[in-house]
Amino acid sequence: MASSPNKKMEVYTVTVATGESEYSGTNNYIFVTLVGEKGESERTLLDNPGMDFCRGAVDEYKVTSPRPLGSLLLVRLEKQRYWVEDNWFCRYVTVEPPGGDKVVFPCYRWLTGDIKVDLRAGTAKTQRDDALAQLLAHRRTELQDRQKIYRWVTWAPGIPRCIDAKTEADLPQDARFENEKRSDFEHSLHYALLELSLKKFAILFGKSWSDLDDFKRIFWKLKSPIAEYCMEHWKEDWFFGYQCLNGSNPRMIQRCKKLPENFPVTSDMVQSSMAPGTNLDQELKEGTVFLLDYAILDGVPTNTIKGKPQYIAAPLCLLYQHPDDGLMPIAIQLGQTPGLDTPIFLPKDPPLAWLLAKIWVRHAEFQVFQVLSHLLRTHLVVEVFCVATLRQLPAVHPIYKLLAPHLRYTLEINTRGRSQLISADGIFKRVVSTGGEGLLILAQREYKVLTYRSLQPYNDFADRGVSRLPNYFYREHSLMLWEAIHSFVSGMVSLYYQSDHDVQGDVELQAWIREIAQEGLAELPSFGLPSKVSTREELSTLLAVVVFTSTVQHAATNNGQFDWCAWVPNTPCTMRQPPPTDKNAATMEMVMASLPDVSQSCLQMAITWHLGRAQPDAIPLGHYTEEHFTEAPAVALINGFRAELEKIEAHILSQNERLELQYLFLLPSRIENSITI
């Protein structure tokens, strides 16, 4: 009997890229199967001579099929244990069919345990772009699997819902810090505390400093140029005004058209602060009078630290844009209810009384910027979008590909924040006057009034009446960056949605926005985000808000916190005496008894350095180290975005050449691509 001739096998060239971070490689068995329209290849063990799947490696293999597979639909990766479990991070797989073009299959995920993963080709597709039942089923299965892993939980009533994880150890591996990041994060705080020579100050813990110069004793090791500048100029009124515009909380200031009824400043009181030939009433009409109102702090329960009560004030501060001197504070009231015990402090008062009043405003500023502007308005808001994205958008969806790099590490840093920073026994409880019960009440108050509109910078500046304030570098830079981000995401939206009808008809996208509004933000009554998105413009604005908040806005509030808080009297984390009730009774002893004690000061410096320093594995805004998009038009948009950011970088550097006090917090190269700290 004659033997049948050998059948010619189709040979596919497959490359597999392993992650570049520590412990990304594996010694486990890796198998691949190519799935095409016309069938599947042989299940192939990927095994070259020597070591496979080492950290950073790109390994090449041959995979055979008895017949042509047609268009490639999926790459199936399988990991099986060899002796011990060894997790593996796969960056991507490429497949080159016989006589065809190479196809990229992005992965960018951990394979843990004995697992099977099906990867889609890199071309972004909405659900309507998929006609094959097999691909539609893949989308559904991926989301069902993710929804089991990423679950919502209510951490506390009245605030956005978050990821269901008590500690970072409860998070899936894909949401965890890489090993280098984790090691650095956990060691940097210990380093900071050691650098402050805590052993040297141990005998002073719980005691007050003797005078203001004593704060220099913890200042010599950890410092920055701005922190040193701050130490030299913190008592000066112009510097107080500068920080209202360009400090860590640059969105508190608002135009004052009419004095609040509970802030009875008279024209005579502040006449000496006015420019010649004008008065308060005239300047109110001109739009040069501004207000800081910390009413949100009124009545917030205060912390008790080591058995001693701490104190909070809810100040009102009036500022005037002087034609020669810049933005200057002209009146301060340290409570919301005027009266004999709540005097109005003025620049012409005894110098220590005026200084102490300003310190109390800066103490209120610490509470608002750390808890509200930073934690609530960036970290926790972005987490809602992060969880919804993971639960409702498959990896092949263009909006998933767009947002994924801007959500890196956010779940872990927020989980650590809840368990280590703002928990019942966290760092805030140990050192901050609103720590404990007050922090949650403050958060609930903010979320009752937080609006989606206020997260859009043009609206925010217009609503606060500050669009014409000079030397407001935060405003100028953030608007430039908003324009660049909005243009970039609009380009992406136009690429994948040809019309508003396409937006309305994307069931995955609509499920995503519905989950954000009805699950994540359900307890925010004033937020005002609809539970459906109807136009390309609405979608572009929403995506721009997510990217802007997770990059620019977070950088504006986070990155300068050490600069403004390292000199502790400038922005104290707590106050140990009640606000003064008599302008003529202020003494240096009263100032020192009010300011943080030695241990509180050391902790404030250590924490703000730990959280505000440049991160060692930071990915700058617009840099996409994980290439989720593979098609040329999308890559061109990313390159265009990068080019625009480089122009903004050059403009900011040029502008700052002439400035003694530079504002570089919103240099694109210093803005991280996601909230990682």
Image (cartoon, helix red, strand yellow):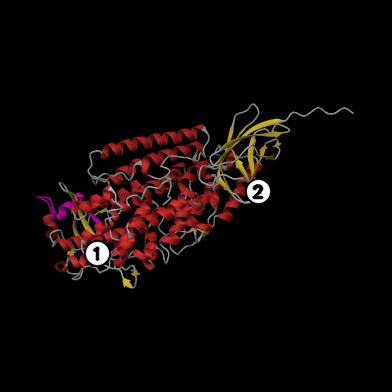
Of the image marks 1 and 2, the number of the one nearer the N terminus: 2
- Position of 245 relative to 101 (above/below): below
Q: Please rate how many residues cluster around mark 1, counting C-alpha atoms within 10 Å: few if below 14, some from 14 to 19, many from 20.
A: many
Q: Out of 81 and 168, give the one closest to the viewer.
A: 81
Residue topped by disc 1: 209
Magenta highlight range: 273-297
Q: List the single residue furthest toward the front.
A: 200
Q: What residue type is labelled 2?
A: Tyr
Q: Which amino acid does label 1 sit on?
A: Trp
From the image, tell me which residue sits under label 2.
82
Q: From the viewer's perspective, tell me whether residue 580 is left or right of residue 526.
A: left
- Find residue 29 and report its horizontal and vertical position in percent: 65, 44
The reply, left or right, for residue 148 in relation to residue 261 is right
Asked if residue 153 shows in the view, the reply is yes
Instruction: From the viewer's side, name the closer residue of 576 and 508.
Output: 576
For mark 2, give the secondary structure. Answer: loop
Quadrant of res 312? bottom left
Q: Pick the residue in front: 92 or 490.
A: 92
Q: Can residue 250 be seen in this view?
A: no
